[in-house]
């Protein structure tokens, strides 16, 4: 059934508007304009915070040459209500299609009002809900047209305007016609102007009886026809109903143009806008613009309102310019006719040493296959001839049986064959159109010859038929095809448990003091609130937030289940349960308060629902957060869940997965070590999977993919795996079919390390950390390119913006809570992708998302400690440099440092410029040693993977709880205790130094404190009398004095500090 698309704009309210009536108030109303359709709300009298709560509908149809998909909203003061100023403008907003979402995803958003000009004074914001819906259109067949053609009188000067080009819509829709600029003042006084503006249109083009069968969409561009004599206009087309059979439109006979009609005046602007509103748009040629090109129009579909407008542009490049071209010989077998059989014949294709058999034919009026085969060609001369033969098997064969024994033709009837010279087969490269199949006569099958329709050509992996074709390097398995997957849309479900009332407690468990707890469950997620103790019948209070992760779409059976439990010494007793459907929960995009509700607690007893009390809850989906499924430091996306808050993309990243080299055998089948490798790349919500190249240690994919980049400081992750499903479950044993896909290696690529427009093509090692140590699994060759779609200044401005959405800063989540939610989100994504076809295995998704990165590892502890040491090495280098100058190892350099000290002391304004210039010199010097290519491979030296013993690796890969023996666990515990003792000593030393600083003024040691404050008094008096520059120079020269004037013993100040008391002597 055809559908009609409508854009719904809910004008909710406004806040903080500007007063306009001279008495400190305004009487605002809202005018919304979309695609030339204008709607107006009612006027709220004398209110700076008006509430309209009105729903405005707009038709969404074919593109317009005048109006675009921009929604304009003006807030004005009604001049008819009290005194007013000359300017009644209160503000405006302009929204593009990125603010439009489907019904069900809408949320109340407040937009700040914008100025009309630079000198305007505007304040306040307006709350809107914007979404689109698809309504079923009435496709009833129209009645037969009248026998008499519609002919306008020639004497009427407006004869040309009365010619009907397309049947108009319903008469009821005439109330929604457009108000032009001249009628705007009349519309502000009353809504009667709408009917007056539509009256001329109704008189000039009265709607026929078939108007009820037409849709409410504007005409598409395909329906626009020039007005020529005795030519019937073609029926209008709709992008959403192209697959349905349309009713026959009544033909209209157009009169011949008369000289009076040709010399008529041109239609006015109001008439043109009225014709647009009534969906009958004739071609109007303006004087002097007959030869001018018309503006390019863009078809508006439902995808126009899904997200970023640029998402409608295909991302995939057809040129495959980052990878190598792989030549294939394509054979498309379509159907056959005139075959002397009633069975299910098969087609056998033989090219060189490769033989493949098609699936059994589908028996209709002909024998149909519609199957494509792709044979790899290392070079154009590698293949000489190709034989295609048709056979009739003795019984029905499945596709798996056909592929498993392609050369077995025993007992099959031969119908004939065709032989092709490969050198004469045409070469096709996109964007060439597909090659049309042709009929070929079968030869060599005896007296009964049939015909076979097929097409054969030489192409590359960029061919449209390549993804779904049978390929020689994938053994034709359905699980070996390259696919694109999308992660589910994830939401944070915030459940605020406030209080409970009217709780019915059984008499057996009743007492003066009760402990109540709320248990919430969503799928496999279970959270519990803190216990609330109720004494002497007081009401339990919690005011606690429980946050879940939910994935769209929300089905009818998806419920949030909350149960009220009474904690008893012997366990818990469920007092009541409430089930809340997820589809009924409100969505929000900011931190506004959601209205709380009371829910009745019920319990099923003997099939009857009994009232057990009620619970006070506040529920909402938080769309202002980014639901993390990856670690924050390797995240590929930071966009919030709500599509209305998405920002435009900053560029695109193109990845060419060329192939791997020198892979290790991952499994053994029939005594032979093989590897069936495929690659997976993940960025944002888009996952791509290459085809699986079977039984190859040097697989070549040469596949290219593209992603939108919304933040340059993100990471693209790519992993290589060995498939255990290439040959299907039937060819494996029961033990082999239960094996998981094996990991080969993983790399990460940070987008910010790529220069815009440059192609990086390199080979990177694939490293895998195993319980036995680091293994070099092979190498992977990649080509990557980042293309910026915004100016460099705007791209640099992105670095100054927060990476996470504002809700992460307004109402932040805890670190532990964020990690728990991330772990839950990764499990939901893995379960969703494992249900695809072909599935992405659960273990593969979790490996790509680093779901187990939070687990304890002694190796990671040591690696992070060394990272901290390396980070602080510059302080050690500075201390060594100062010590060298202080000990006069190089007298010339020390004298220069004295001169620098004198300059900085006497001219302190040069300190900051000197430091800044020094940092600039260091950065410019290191520019020569920068990395020319990105290094996405994992570094085993930084990870401390090569220097870690096997016991620590075995502990890292151990499960929780441990599956090792008691002796191994005891040894690990003793080792951990020894490390903890050292950490304990370091923490004690740090605490002691801080306590000595506090002891300077706390009078724990009265003599030490008296000496310190007396010295502070002397220093204060000296600094009041002596200029600070003199004091600074004296201290500097004293510190840099020659070693012959120094004592080897510690300084008196250090000795004094070490003698200060600490709290260590008071610890037990």
Image (cartoon, rainbow, N blue to C red):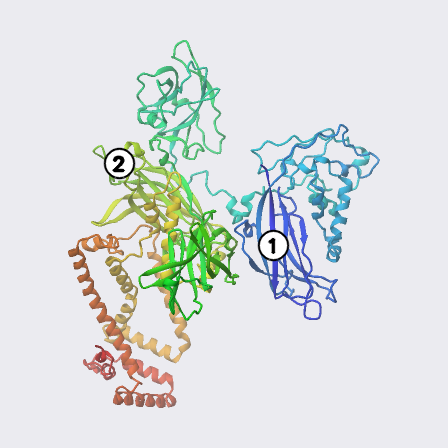
- On residue 10, which mark appears? 1
Q: Is residue 154 left or right of residue 118?
A: right
Q: Is residue 69 visible?
A: no
Q: Are marks 1 and 2 in contact (CB under 8 Å)?
A: no
**Quadrant in the rendering for residue 469:** top left
Q: In what element is the residue under mark 1?
A: strand
In the rendered image, residue 400, in percent from the top left (x then y), is placed at 34, 28
Please tell me which of labels 1 and 2 falls first in the chain: 1
- On residue 734, which mark appears? 2
> Viewer-proximal residue, 554 or 850?
554
Nearest to the eye among marks 1 and 2: give it. Answer: 2
Q: Is residue 534 visible?
A: yes
Q: Is residue 146 above or below residue 447?
A: below
In the rendered image, residue 651, in percent from the top left (x then y), is placed at 47, 50
Cα–Cα gap, marks 1 and 2: 59 Å
Q: Is residue 684 above or below residue 893?
A: above
Q: Which residue does the image show at 66% across and 37% down from the upper left?
A: 214
Q: Is residue 909 left or right of residue 693?
A: right
Q: Residue furthest top?
A: 447
């Amino acid at each position: 059934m055809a559908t009609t698309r409508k854009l719904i704009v809910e004008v909710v309210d406004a806040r903080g508007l500007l007063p306009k009536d001279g008495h400190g108030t305004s009487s605002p109303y809202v005018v919304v304009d979309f695609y030339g359709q204008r709607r107006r709300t009612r006027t709220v009298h004398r209110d700076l915070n008006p509430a309209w709560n009105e729903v405005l509908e707009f038709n969404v149809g074919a593109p317009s040459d005048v109006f675009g998909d921009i929604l304009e909203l003006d807030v004005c003061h009604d001049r008819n209500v009290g005194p007013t100023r000359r300017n009644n403008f209160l503000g405006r907003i302009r929204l593009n299609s990125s603010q439009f979402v489907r019904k069900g995803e809408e949320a109340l958003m407040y937009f700040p009002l914008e100025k009309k000009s630079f000198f305007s004074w505007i304040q306040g914001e307006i709350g809107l809900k914007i979404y689109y819906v698809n309504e079923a259109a009435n496709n009833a067949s129209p009645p037969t047209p009248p026998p008499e053609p519609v002919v306008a009188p020639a004497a009427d000067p407006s004869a040309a305007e009365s010619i009907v080009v397309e049947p108009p819509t319903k008469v009821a829709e005439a109330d929604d016609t457009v108000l032009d600029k001249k009628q705007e003042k009349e519309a502000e006084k009353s809504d009667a102007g709408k009917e007056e503006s539509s009256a001329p249109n109704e008189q000039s083009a009265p709607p026929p009886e078939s108007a009820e069968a037409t849709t409410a969409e504007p005409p598409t561009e395909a329906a626009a026809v020039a007005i020529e004599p005795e030519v019937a206009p073609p029926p209008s087309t709709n992008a959403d109903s192209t697959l349905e059979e349309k009713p026959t439109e009544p033909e209209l006979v157009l009169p011949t143009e008369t000289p009076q009609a040709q010399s008529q005046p041109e239609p006015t602007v109001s008439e043109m806008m009225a014709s647009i509103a009534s969906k009958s748009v004739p071609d109007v040629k303006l004087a002097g613009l007959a030869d001018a090109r018309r503006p390019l129009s863009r078809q508006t579909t439902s995808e126009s309102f899904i997200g970023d407008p640029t998402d409608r542009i295909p991302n995939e490049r057809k040129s495959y310019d980052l990878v190598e071209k792989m030549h294939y010989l394509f054979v498309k077998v379509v159907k056959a006719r005139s075959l002397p059989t009633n069975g299910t014949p098969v087609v056998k294709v033989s090219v060189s040493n490769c033989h493949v058999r098609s699936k059994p034919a589908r028996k209709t009026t002909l024998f149909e296959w519609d199957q494509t085969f792709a044979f790899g060609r290392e070079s154009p001369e590698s293949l000489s001839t190709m034989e295609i033969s048709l056979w009739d098997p003795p019984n029905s064969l499945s596709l798996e049986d056909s592929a498993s024994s392609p050369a077995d033709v025993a007992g099959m009837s031969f119908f004939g064959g065709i032989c092709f010279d490969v050198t004469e087969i045409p070469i096709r490269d996109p964007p060439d159109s597909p090659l049309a199949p042709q009929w070929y006569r079968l030869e060599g099958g005896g007296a009964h010859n049939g015909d076979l329709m097929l097409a054969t050509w030489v192409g590359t992996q960029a061919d449209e038929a390549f993804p779904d074709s049978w390929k020689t390097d994938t053994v034709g398995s359905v699980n070996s095809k390259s696919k694109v997957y999308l992660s589910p849309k994830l939401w944070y479900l915030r459940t605020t448990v406030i209080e409970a009332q009217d709780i019915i407690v059984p008499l057996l468990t009743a007492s003066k003091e009760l402990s109540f707890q709320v248990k919430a469950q969503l799928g496999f997620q279970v959270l519990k609130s803190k216990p609330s103790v109720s004494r002497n019948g007081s009401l339990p209070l919690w005011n606690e937030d429980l946050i879940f992760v939910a994935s769209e779409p929300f089905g009818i059976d998806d419920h949030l289940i909350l149960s009220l439990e009474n904690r008893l010494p012997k366990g818990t007793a469920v007092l009541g349960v409430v089930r809340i459907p997820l589809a009924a929960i409100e969505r929000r995009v900011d931190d506004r308060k959601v209205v709380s509700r009371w829910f009745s607690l019920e319990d099923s007893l003997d099939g009857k629902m009994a009232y057990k009390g009620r619970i006070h809850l506040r529920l909402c989906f938080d769309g202002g957060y980014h639901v993390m499924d990856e670690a924050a430091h390797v995240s590929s996306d930071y966009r919030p869940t709500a599509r209305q808050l998405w920002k435009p993309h900053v560029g695109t990243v193109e990845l060419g997965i060329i192939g791997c080299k020198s892979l290790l055998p991952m499994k053994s089948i029939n005594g032979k070590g093989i590897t069936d490798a495929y690659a997976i790349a993940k960025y944002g919500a888009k996952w791509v999977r290459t085809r699986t190249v079977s039984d190859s240690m040097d697989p070549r994919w040469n596949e290219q993919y593209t992603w939108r980049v919304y933040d340059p400081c993100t990471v693209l992750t790519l992993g290589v795996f060995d498939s255990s499903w290439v040959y299907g479950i039937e060819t494996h044993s029961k033990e082999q079919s239960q094996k998981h896909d094996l990991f080969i290696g993983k790399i990460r690529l940070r987008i910010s390390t790529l220069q815009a427009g440059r192609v990086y093509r390199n080979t990177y090692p694939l490293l895998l950390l195993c319980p036995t140590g680091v293994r070099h699994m092979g190498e992977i060759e990649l080509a990557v390119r980042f293309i910026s779609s915004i100016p460099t200044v705007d791209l640099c401005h992105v670095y100054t913006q927060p990476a996470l959405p504002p809700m992460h800063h307004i109402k932040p989540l805890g670190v532990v809570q964020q990690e728990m939610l991330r772990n839950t989100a990764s499990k939901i994504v893995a379960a969703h992708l494992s249900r695809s076809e072909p599935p992405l295995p659960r273990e593969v998704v979790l490996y790509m998302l680093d779901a187990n990165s939070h687990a304890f590892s002694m190796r990671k502890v040591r690696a992070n400690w060394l990272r901290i040491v390396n980070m602080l090495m510059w302080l050690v280098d500075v201390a060594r440099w100062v010590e060298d100058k202080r000990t006069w190892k190089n007298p010339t350099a020390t004298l220069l440092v004295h001169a620098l000290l004198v300059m900085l002391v006497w001219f302190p304004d040069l300190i900051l410029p000197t430091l800044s210039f020094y940092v600039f010199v260091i950065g410019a010097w290191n520019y020569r040693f920068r990395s020319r290519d990105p290094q996405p491979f994992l570094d085993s030296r930084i990870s401390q993977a090569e220097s870690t013993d096997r016991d620590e690796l075995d502990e890292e890969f151990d499960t929780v709880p441990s599956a090792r023996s008691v002796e191994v666990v005891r040894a690990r515990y003793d080792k951990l205790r020894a490390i903890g003792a050292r950490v304990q000593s370091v923490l004690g030393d740090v605490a002691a130094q801080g306590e000595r600083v506090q002891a300077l003024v706390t009078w724990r040691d009265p003599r030490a404190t008296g000496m310190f404050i007396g010295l502070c008094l002397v220093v204060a008096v000296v600094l009041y009398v002596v200029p600070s520059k003199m004091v600074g120079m004296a201290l500097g020269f004293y510190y840099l004095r020659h070693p012959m004037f120094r004592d080897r013993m510690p300084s008196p100040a250090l000795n004094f500090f070490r003698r200060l008391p600490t709290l260590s002597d008071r610890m037990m």
